[in-house]
């Protein structure tokens, strides 16, 4: 019965996305939304794949922290991709379906590779006070640097979140500021604030009920938003609080509750937009955090089909004095971004496909599985909920950017190192 309820929740979620894409976001004319008719049989096939994966592949209950990441990827990336990718580009629906089958197979590979006993990862034993200082001091320092940069430059102090052109211009200005210093790691240090240090402070504060760490995390996230206007910095506190509210402890049916919750958000957001012109939920959540992942997958497939770029745009090459080629995001943006030079960032799998073709999907799943297995191993030393929340965050990041980029720029490696250094207090050992 529980498995049937899970499948029903996933199918209902898919139906809500299909309805909202055509009848809400599509009708409002946002530039990032495309509507193209295609045979209904492929939409039915998408629902069949969703039902099959929910029935036979996805875990019913949370047993390891990586299960949270798998559910985040499945519901926020794969489900919308199986239903909405056909709307983007000009390729025949049959060809897109074949590509989506390959994407689904790579996701199944990820799930299978994440199974098995916990890895015995080495613990980096340090005093608890040192761990806390490693969170607090850099977070405070970098938050101050961000605010100082934003106030001393010509960056506009306000951003209209609903004006895509204005938001993209703001991001480019912030990127130029972050890359203008002579110290090549400066931009990475600031990125780590919003993508690793601040999120860990926030979720650590929520789990341990420490107001100081919650405040530090919010300060770091809001300061980064003040600099570059990236909306994900605003959503992260909601994301973490939502995961904890749904339950990411062992034995929780997290996937079922997440699917029903997302269905409700999509439906309520669409209703409020149509009936009351309140667009915050549907525009900034449904479109930006869910549907954009499907549209970018289709755009990356059409742009790099048969022409992989072999990581020639890999950003960290700047650290060794090599200038990367035009980024994949800009190449896609030139074709699909309505003239917006900021481009479209691909997710972990679409970016790896752009680099290596179909084989890149396998590489992405293998690399993601290795990282998630390492995170699982840290749950031997750190609280289960903390590790599970960070796995959910990592999955959120992989839905927004390339896996290779996420390791450094988005703090996946730093998050892993911080978890390896975690030392439970006596009260935590009694709980975990």
Image (spheres, helix red, strand yellow):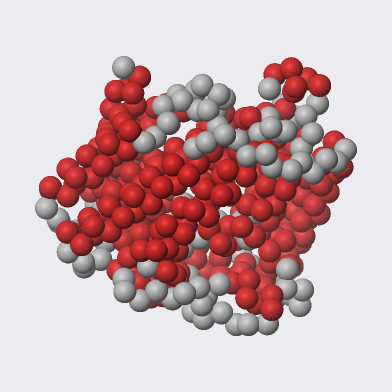
Occupied quadrant, residue 388 = top right
Residue 343 place in picture, x, y as percent = 44, 69
Q: Quadrant of the N terminus?
A: top left
Q: Is residue 73 above or below residue 253?
A: below
Residue 105 place in picture, x, y as percent = 34, 50
Occupied quadrant, residue 391 = top right
| Nearest to the observer: residue 405 or residue 227 | 405
Residue 229 place in picture, x, y as percent = 57, 57
Residue drawn at 77 percent across, 60 percent down: 145
| Nearest to the observer: residue 203 or residue 429 | 429
Residue drawn at 69 percent across, 75 percent down: 319
Residue drawn at 66 percent across, 34 percent down: 379
Q: Is residue 309 above or below residue 80?
A: below
Q: Is residue 276 left or right of residue 62?
A: left
Q: Quadrant of the C terminus?
A: top right
Q: Is residue 217 above or below residue 208?
A: below
| Nearest to the observer: residue 251 or residue 238 | 251
Residue 287 seen in render: no
Residue drawn at 42 percent across, 31 percent down: 59
Residue 224 place in picture, x, y as percent = 65, 55
Residue 182 seen in render: yes
């Amino acid at each position: 019965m529980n498995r049937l309820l899970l499948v029903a929740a996933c199918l209902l979620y898919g139906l809500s996305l299909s309805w909202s894409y055509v009848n809400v976001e599509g009708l409002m004319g946002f530039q990032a939304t495309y509507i193209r008719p295609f045979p209904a049989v492929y939409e039915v096939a998408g629902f069949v794949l969703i039902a099959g994966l929910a029935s036979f592949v996805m875990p019913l209950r949370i047993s390891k922290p990586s299960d949270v990441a798998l559910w985040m990827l499945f519901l926020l990336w794969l489900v919308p991709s199986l239903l909405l990718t056909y709307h983007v580009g000009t390729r025949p629906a049959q060809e897109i379906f074949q590509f989506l089958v390959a994407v689904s197979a790579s996701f199944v590979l990820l799930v299978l590779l994440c199974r098995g006993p916990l890895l015995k990862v080495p613990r980096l034993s340090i005093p608890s006070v040192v761990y806390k200082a490693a969170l607090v001091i850099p977070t405070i320092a970098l938050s101050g640097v961000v605010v100082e940069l934003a106030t001393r430059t010509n960056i506009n102090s306000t951003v209209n979140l609903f004006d895509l052109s204005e938001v993209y211009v703001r991001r480019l200005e912030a990127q130029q500021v972050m890359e203008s210093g002579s110290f090549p790691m400066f931009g990475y240090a600031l990125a780590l604030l919003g993508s690793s240090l601040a999120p860990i402070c926030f979720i650590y504060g929520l789990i341990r009920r420490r107001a100081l760490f919650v405040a530090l995390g919010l300060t770091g996230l809001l300061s980064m938003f003040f600099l570059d206007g990236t909306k994900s910095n605003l959503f992260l506190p909601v994301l973490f609080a939502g995961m904890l509210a749904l339950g990411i402890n062992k034995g929780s049916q997290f996937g079922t509750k997440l699917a029903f919750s997302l269905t409700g958000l999509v439906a309520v957001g669409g209703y409020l937009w149509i009936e009351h012109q309140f667009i915050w939920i549907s525009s900034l959540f449904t479109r930006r955090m869910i549907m954009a992942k499907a549209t970018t997958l289709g755009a990356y497939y059409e742009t790099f089909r048969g022409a992989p770029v072999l990581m020639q745009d890999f950003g960290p090459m700047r650290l060794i004095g090599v200038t990367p080629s035009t980024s994949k995001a800009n190449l896609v943006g030139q074709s699909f971004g309505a003239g917006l030079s900021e481009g479209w960032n691909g997710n972990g799998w679409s970016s790896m496909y752009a680099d290596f073709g179909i084989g890149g999907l396998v590489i992405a799943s293998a690399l993601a599985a290795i990282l998630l297995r390492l995170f699982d191993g840290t749950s031997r030393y750190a609280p289960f909920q903390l590790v599970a929340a960070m796995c959910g965050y990592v999955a959120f990041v992989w839905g927004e950017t390339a896996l290779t980029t996420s390791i450094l720029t988005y703090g996946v490696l730093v998050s892993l190192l911080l978890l390896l250094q975690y030392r439970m207090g006596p009260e935590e050992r009694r709980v975990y």
